[in-house]
Amino acid sequence: MDIDLTLRAKEFASKDPFPMMGFGPIEWWVGNAFMTAQAFRALLGMEIVGYAGPETGVRDRSSYLLKSDQIRFIVTGCQDGDHEIAEHVKLHGPGIKDVGFLVPDAVHAHAMAVERGAESYREPVKIENDRGRMVIGAIRTYGETVHSLIELEGEDPRFEERTDTIARPTGLHAVDHVVANVELGKMNEWVGFYEKIFSFTMLRHFDDEAISTEYTALMSKVMAGGNGIIKLPINEPADGKKKSQIEEYLDFYKTPGVQHIAMSTDDLQTTISDIHGRGLETIYVPHEYYPEAKERLAGIDLDWDNLEAESILVDKDDDGYLLQTFSKMLQDRPTVFFEFIERRGATGFGVGNFKALFESIEREQAKRGNL
């Protein structure tokens, strides 16, 4: 490595162990980018604001850039069955390839990550046009997932601008957290990776007693970086009577990867009512959950009838309370799904809802014959 670059990387980290400004674009590799983009627009209200493909000089793939306030998704499909994207989708099904991080200096961020032991996936390159300037590099992480390190001024110059007059927003405004599933015994290894490479710290630790039902269990550690802006829970299976949701994911995705993306809204009840009306299904929460939850959150003024009608879960911690729910699977394989969350002060992850959530997931597993 160039000595000057190493020194500049250290200078880059002098005020912050690894400066980050938040989540960047999250890229999906899919079999049909056009239809996936249309689905996200129709079901989530995301605007299609950019396109790159053969018509713009990109010969091997087609990509659509979607946004909902601060959220950015890229959905990418390929033009040839021998392409690495086609091979990825064939083996894993549709899924998330790249979880991007926004950084103030992508060259130095990439250099520092590699110096600390990360494997480079793509060396930093500069892309620029009259709409914006980007410097982007990437490193490898769990499974086949990568993290792009993105320095961006203005609009994303990789895409031809599109104006969307069709999308109807649902109130989703930011990525709250991104959850990874890894193999049994690998959680602590990846916790160490994020500590070493990105100077993340562990925000929460949930053991198999906290996250368990009669039949299954898992363990989770929540890593946080960028002064807490970026939160990455990491899950691994734990011993149980039957197959856990993490094991099911690994069986069908064939490798560790992103299990779900949590997106925040300021009014979950309105957002979910809208999303349900568009045809996106969320988990079913049985009636028995709500009397216990109402007692657990006594003193908080909530529309419990509406919460039950929309199958919304509620939890509290020392800082406040939160509302959350989860979509059913987003593709044929039981792998990736969404979480929708509204935080009213709470900084946790709904530990009081874990049992109800995982019992709901187990009901779906049982229907698939995978429990």
Image: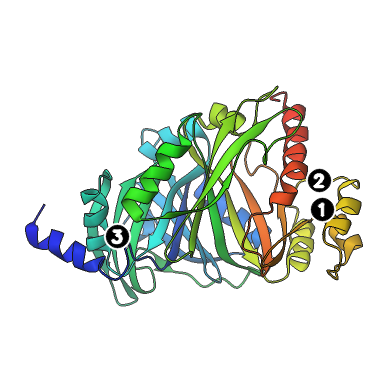
Instruction: Assess disc 2: are there few (<14), some (14-19) or many (≥20) residues with their C-alpha within 10 Å of its C-alpha.
Output: many
Q: Quadrant of residue 268?
A: bottom right
Residue 355 point in image, percent of width and height: 75, 42
* Contact check, label 1 and label 2, Cβ < 8 Å: yes
- Residue at image location 66% in from the left, 67% down from the top: 319
Instruction: Assess disc 3: are there few (<14), some (14-19) or many (≥20) residues with their C-alpha within 10 Å of its C-alpha.
Output: many
Q: Judge whether 124 appears above or below 320 on screen.
A: above
Q: Which residue is mark 3?
A: 136
Q: Quadrant of residue 9?
A: bottom left
Q: Which mark is residue 344?
A: none
- Residue at image location 79% in from the left, 59% down from the top: 277
- Observer able to see residue 31: no
The three-letter code of the residue at mark 3 reads Ile
Nearer to the camera, 322 or 78: 322
Nearer to the camera, 39 or 246: 246
Q: Is residue 3 left or right of residue 117?
A: left
Mark 3 and mark 2: span between their CA atoms? Answer: 41 Å
Q: Secondary structure at mark 1?
A: loop
Rendered-image quadrant of the C terminus: top right
* Contact check, label 3 and label 2, Cβ < 8 Å: no
Label located before the other in sequence (1 or 2): 2
Q: Which residue is mark 1?
A: 311
Residue at the front extreme of this rendering: 318
Q: Which mark is residue 284?
A: 2
Residue 48 point in image, percent of width and height: 53, 65
Residue at the left extreme of this rendering: 3
